[in-house]
Amino acid sequence: MDEGHQERGSNFYFSVIVSATSSNASAYPLSYAQSHLIGIKLLIVDDNATNRKILTLQTRAWGMEARAANSGKEALAWLHSGERFDLAIIDMQMPQMNGMTLATEIQNIPHCRNLPLIMLTSVGKVKVVDVGQNFARFLNKPVRQSQLYDTLVRVLNKQSIRDKPVSKIASRLSNRLSENLPLRILLAEDNLVNQKVATRILERMGYRADIVANGLEVLEAIQRQNYDVILMDLQMPEMDGLEATRRIIQDWSNLSEHDRMGASMNGSKKRPRIIAMTANAMHGDRETCLAAGMDDYISKPISIEELVSALKRCG
């Protein structure tokens, strides 16, 4: 509303309608996710490829082991084959089999009866009474990162999953790997969150990694200390992973020319094995990494199984 007053200007009044923020909104710190979401096996069921990719990338960034099915039929095939999950996110609106029907089918499978299910819907807010007993919580699309995070933590807390599967998760991240395959690891990663997630996973395997944030720091680190493995991010400031790898390969190549005279680098004649890490892997990335001299390749967010396999190949 405009109230005009000659020689005094105008006063404007307006109203803004906003939604109140829930007083019980979650305030779980990111470190909580890194310690309690790591290793949790998540099933995602959504017919939309973009939704599947977003959910998969985000949850894997928190250390979860996410697997995405494009239909209820595909998800049921995995479950009937004996594959087990700690949690599932199911889209409500899917062709052939909707989320409600899929939830019922899942809970008819003996080993899935207590599997917590989260409904994903774009049809406004769904009342709890409409959800019934099949779903622990619901999420409205588009899903905000904070909402997804809070929902996962709340459901896991309610189901006490964070306590129940400790032995199961520990078995997947057994420190026997570090006992059977002792490795000195250098992690080259500039993203702080990725650093924390990766080091937490490695710690649960029994490894302690030194951390650097760019290729130049990698080159400095290997001059000070011998490493068996370098987990090398491709995209880093100052010097990226590809260039750092080329420099390392060149250094060791030059070293080999003098090896006959007994020269060595930091007391070691063995070049560290370089494992590339890259997000949003594109066709040809693997070939580019191998061409630069890298020995192996894993995608980000880090898959625990993929990392374990890569480390085992270092033996």
Image (cartoon, helix red, strand yellow):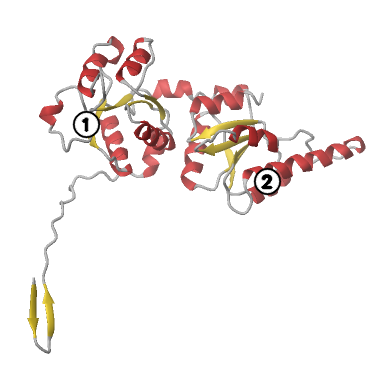
- Under circle 1, the secondary element is strand
Q: Earlier in the sequence, mark 1 or mark 2?
A: 1
> Is 226 on the left or on the right of 213, as rendered?
right
In the image, is residue 104 above or below residue 53? above
Closer-to-camera residue (29/107): 107
Q: Badge 1 local density, few (<14 within 10 Å), some, or many (20+)?
A: some
> Dot 2, how many residues are within 10 Å of its Cα: few (below 14), some (14-19), or many (20+)?
some
Q: Is residue 87 above or below residue 140?
A: above
Q: Is residue 266 visible?
A: no
Mark 2 residue type? Glu
Q: Give the residue type that dot 1 points to.
A: Arg
| 19 sits to left or right of 212 | left
The nearer-to-camera label among 1 and 2 is 2
Front residue (pair 213, 6) = 6
Secondary structure under tag 2 reads: helix
Res 107 quadrant in image: top left
Residue 109: mark: none
For image coordinates 10% across by 28% down, the residue present is: 129
Of the 4 image quadrants, the one containing the N terminus is bottom left
Residue 207, percent across and down? 57, 32
Q: Quadrant of residue 30?
A: top left
Residue 119: percent from left, percent from top: 24, 29
Residue 131 visible in the snapshot: yes
Measuring 18% from the left and 50% from the top, which residue is drawn there? 21
Location of residue 50 (image quadrant): top left
Residue occupying the far right of the picture: 261
Q: Which residue is mark 1?
A: 137
Q: Which residue is mark 2?
A: 243
Query: Foreground residue, 72 or 257?
Result: 72
Q: Position of residue 136 (x, y in %)?
A: 21, 28
